[in-house]
Image: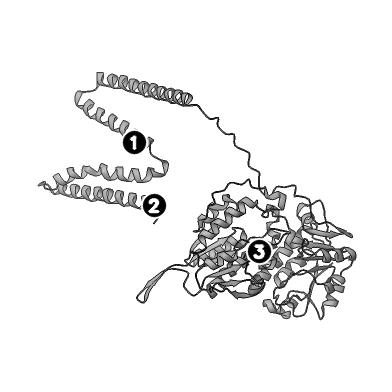
Amino acid sequence: MKIGTPKEVFEGERRVAMTPDSALQLQKLGYECAIETGAGEAAGFSDAAYEAAGVEILPTAAQLFKAADIIAKVREPNETEAKRLSADKTLISFFWPAQNAEMLELCKSKGASVIAMDMVPRISRAQKMDALSSMANIAGYRAVIEAGNNFGRFFTGQVTAAGKVPPAKVLIVGAGVAGLAAIGTSTSLGAMTYAFDVRPEVAEQIESMGAEFVYLDFEEESQDGAATGGYAAPSSPEFREAQLKKFRELAPEMDIVITTALIPGRDAPVLWTKDMVEMMKPGSVVVDLAAEKGGNCELTEKDQRVVSDNGVVIIGYTDFPSRMATQASTLYSTNIRHMMTDLTPEKDGQPNHNMEDDVIRGATVTHEGEITFPPPPPKVKAIAAQKPKEKAPELTPEEKRAAEVAAFKKETKTQVTLLAVGGLLLLAVGLVAPASFMQHFIVFVLSVFIGFQVIWNVSHSLHTPLMAVTNAISSIIILGALMQIGSGSFLVILLAALSVFMAGINIFGGFLVTRRMLAMFQKS
């Protein structure tokens, strides 16, 4: 069979669904490849590069749709393209079936199979086909670049002879793929980065990237991602009010706000309202990555750069991935190639549309003259459900007191037993050892006992600094070496000098290591 890629007709779209490299991989699966002339030029791929990869170049889109059995596109088809489909053809592209009911009906009437790349379920096995994540990664990175282009200051703080520049404060709303990409870019540019997400469990991911997680003092039971294909679910009205209240507290401090919140099948929730924009400083920037679905900012205008009355720039561009067309095309074509790998298990150039497969079933929106959207939940959960922890029963004051007394008695009994055994062993050694030995041995045993008690009650994370200080203190033996340095024997002086040198390393090194280790537990 033949896979064909037409030139994108959506205004401003520069991406292409097939690259010369992906065409070579598709040919290994047994397919022939074709592309409309000029389809890859805007993304930096010439017709000559496709020809060198063994791809057939067709002059018009009509000829390509007629010749190809499988059509791979980026954007959803327009009416003309959909009418060119037939029962023996398969379309693979972004489709947005929940928002394109009329197009869904048209494709059904044509009998074509349609695989929507935006409907790939977010389960582990499907990550290689997750085109939304691929494009969101680029969009998050590009959003920070666009924000910097419209922001009048450095991201990082600087102290120069010409004056002091404070670091920019950046708030990322949503820590999905786009949000994490934006966090990584923002922190790498030196901005003070804050991030919010409805899932408190992502706090560790955010903080590991150098950003500060914005906690919300509101508890709400989270839904397992399997129910929504691994995507975000709507929040309750009470949670939304608490969320907006927190954003109003942050708005006057933030220089740049990047919003990324999307819910499949719905318009984007409004999270940054008009009054929040009015609270921001003049020259601040809001980048709305949800502009294509209505926008998270109340003042967003699709595909426009708007300046509010108080001088805040609101960017509602919907083509962030297309602004990095070469990279975006490479990633998207790889997603398509992985989808074709799953569709062609025998690598014989014949697709097997297995509707029992979670990924293929989830992404298929029309098949054999039927609308198959929405899909059933995947059999494999997107997020493993956590087993509820059993709450310990509340103890009465009397029960708490009894438990403390029992614990104290048990600990006392253990210590008395150990001391008794240790005392008997010392007496046994004293029966046969000389008195001079016993004096030193008792001091040694007591020092071991005290050292054990000190270290046993210290947190594990502090063991290294504690041992470093212990080494430094134990180097009091340097006094003996210093006393011998005045000896008349050259050999004694040499050995004493070496002892002073090594003990000095232990002392200064011990305190230096301790200082550096303890600094790791402090916020500067």
Q: Is residue 87 visible?
A: no
Which sits in the foreground, 297 or 477? 297
Count neighbours of disc 1 (C-alpha within 10 A) and say few if under 14, some if 14 to 19, many if 20 or more.
few
Q: Which mark is residue 223?
A: none
Count neighbours of disc 2 (C-alpha within 10 A) and say few if under 14, some if 14 to 19, many if 20 or more.
few
Q: Which mark is residue 522?
A: 2
Above or below for 215 versus 335: above
Q: CA distance from mark 1 to mark 3?
A: 53 Å
Q: Which mark is residue 134?
A: 3
Which sits in the foreground, 306 or 87? 306
Q: Is residue 184 visible?
A: yes
**In the rendered structure, which amino acid carries the disc numbered 1?**
Val
Count neighbours of disc 3 (C-alpha within 10 A) and say few if under 14, some if 14 to 19, many if 20 or more.
many
Residue that numbered label 1 is attached to: 454
Q: Is residue 479 left or right of residue 167?
A: left
**In the rendered structure, which amino acid carries the disc numbered 3?**
Ser
What secondary structure is marked by label 2? loop
x then y, percent, for residue 170: 51, 64
Q: CA distance from mark 3 to mark 2?
A: 37 Å
Q: Quadrant of residue 411?
A: top left
Above or below for 524 versus 77: above
x then y, percent, for residue 229: 71, 53
Quadrant location of the N terminus? bottom right
